[in-house]
Amino acid sequence: MTELYLPMFIMFAIAAGICAVMFLGGQYLGPKNPTPEKRLPFECGNDTSGTRGVRLSVKFYLTAILFVVFDIEAVFIYPWAALFKGLGWPGFMTMLAFIVALLVALAYCWKKGALEWES
Amino acid sequence: MPTELLKNPYVHGAVYGVVIVTVLMTITAWSIWFERKFAGRMQSRVGPTLVGPFGLLQPLADAVKLLQKEDIVPASADRALFNLAPPLTVLFALGTAAVIPFSPEVIAADLDVGVLWVLAMGGLTVFPVWIAGWASNNKYALLGGMRSVAQGISYEIPLVLAALVPVTLAGSMSISDIVRYQEKNGWVVGMPPGPGILAFLIFFLASLAEANRIPFDIPEAESELIAGVTTEYTGMKFGLFYLAEYLHTLIVAAVGAALFFGGWAGPFGLGSGLHWMVGKTLLLFFGVFWVRWTFLRFRADQLMSLCWKYLVPAGLVLVMLSAFWVHYKAGTRG
């Protein structure tokens, strides 16, 4: 088990090393002359107006909820997909019922207008 | 004995890790040169020509220039998170590469759950983008980050469903097992006539969206959001974001080649080997560039309705169709 995942950690270590070199290289090789103007939030050269606290559309949160529902269902299909050859037609019918339920749920969200971005 | 030494997991991981990371970074650097050249030709320009023959040394010049730029952190930014985001994007992009089988031997870690690992790492890429958007303390960066997260998580679902089709056909989540299955039974794209190619198209579109490539680059729509989450980043930190975008695209092309185009298996019984996998990956990578310079950017609402109203239901139906096909074929055979 450890042997299987060991290369992952090695890979991450190599990647982290490369990132560190690039990051620190940029930090030390570049000039350092921070002025108050440079450190303002950049808005295409205009004076900064308002604060960051902009109101975000509720649709983003709706998308997040839909994602949680459907992505978990999709990942739930994975173990079945790896094993279903041994489950035969009963296994197929069970998953068919599950997918139909998911499609009905999607149709409900659609009907309720949860998928409409503009309105 | 070099071959015996390679069987040691530490040595194997280290050697293939270094080789794969180095090769990927090199291809990525020169793909940026290639894309600029290609885009230039498509727009009746010549692209970079000055640095080296045909501008071939341009990536090195770019790297040196990025390193020499001043590193500005906005006064109101959350400094720690602001600095954390760019390296994280590269880290997650490279983390995916560990499970991609370039040939039966050239693979850093042959995980049983390779497909799941790829999808999980792809899903993680939304975190650094959101961290960058939030920590910049700039409203354009914040909006870009929010859009990017919404797009990334939405397209995650068609991606997961499309990748289920090869998993269903091969009956395994290990990418090398899927490639071996394709070696015996033909590539997934042509497999059950219909679902295979459709699943690949969904996978391709969703990957483009996850990598924020045109026509799905709404998170950094220059005309609306300056540069999205990368607005406040200068010098090498911007370079890291840029590198991660290309790396992610390249790795997604490699995953697509392995899952749908038979990986290291050659077409028409022409043998198999590393060169096939590399060739297919580069061909798909080129396809991404081609799409980028051919199509226009979608609107945010078009993007969302394409995902939820077409790709998600299509993905669910495709999974059942391929499962039906497997059972049907097993039934007729025995």
Image: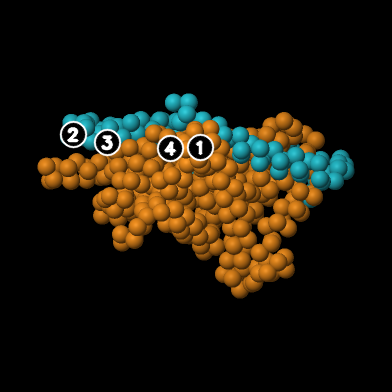
3 or 4: mark nearer the eye: 4
Query: Regarding mark 2 in the picture, which secondary structure is present there?
Result: helix
What kind of residue is marked 1? Leu
2 or 4: mark nearer the eye: 4
Q: Residue furthest front?
A: B1
* Whole-percent x, y for residue B178 in the image: 34, 43
* Contact between labelled residues 4 and 3, with CB atoms less than 8 Å apart: no
Q: Chain A drawn in what color?
A: cyan
User: Which residue shows up at 82% across the image and 46% down it?
Assistant: A30
User: Which residue shows up at 38% across the image and 38% down it?
Assistant: B174
Residue tagged 2: A88
Residue tagged 3: A100
Mark 2 on the same chain as mark 4? no
B89 horizontally vs B308: left or right: right
Query: Regarding mark 1 in the picture, which secondary structure is present there?
Result: helix
In 3D space, how far apart are the residues under numbered discs 3 and 2 (Cα atoms)?
19 Å
Please, which chain is the residue tagged with disc 1 on?
B
What kind of residue is marked 4? Asp
Mark 4 on the same chain as mark 1? yes
In 3D space, how far apart are the residues under numbered discs 4 and 1 (Cα atoms)?
18 Å
Please, which chain is the residue tagged with disc 2 on?
A
What kind of residue is marked 2? Gly
Residue B267 location, quadrant: bottom left
Residue tagged 1: B5
1 or 3: mark nearer the eye: 1
Residue A101, relative to residue A21: is it above or below?
above
Q: Which mark is residue B79?
A: none
Neighbour tally class for label 1: few under 14, some 14-19, many 20 plus, Cα within 10 Å: few
Residue tagged 4: B110
Mark 3 on the same chain as mark 4? no
* Whole-percent x, y for residue A78 in the image: 35, 34
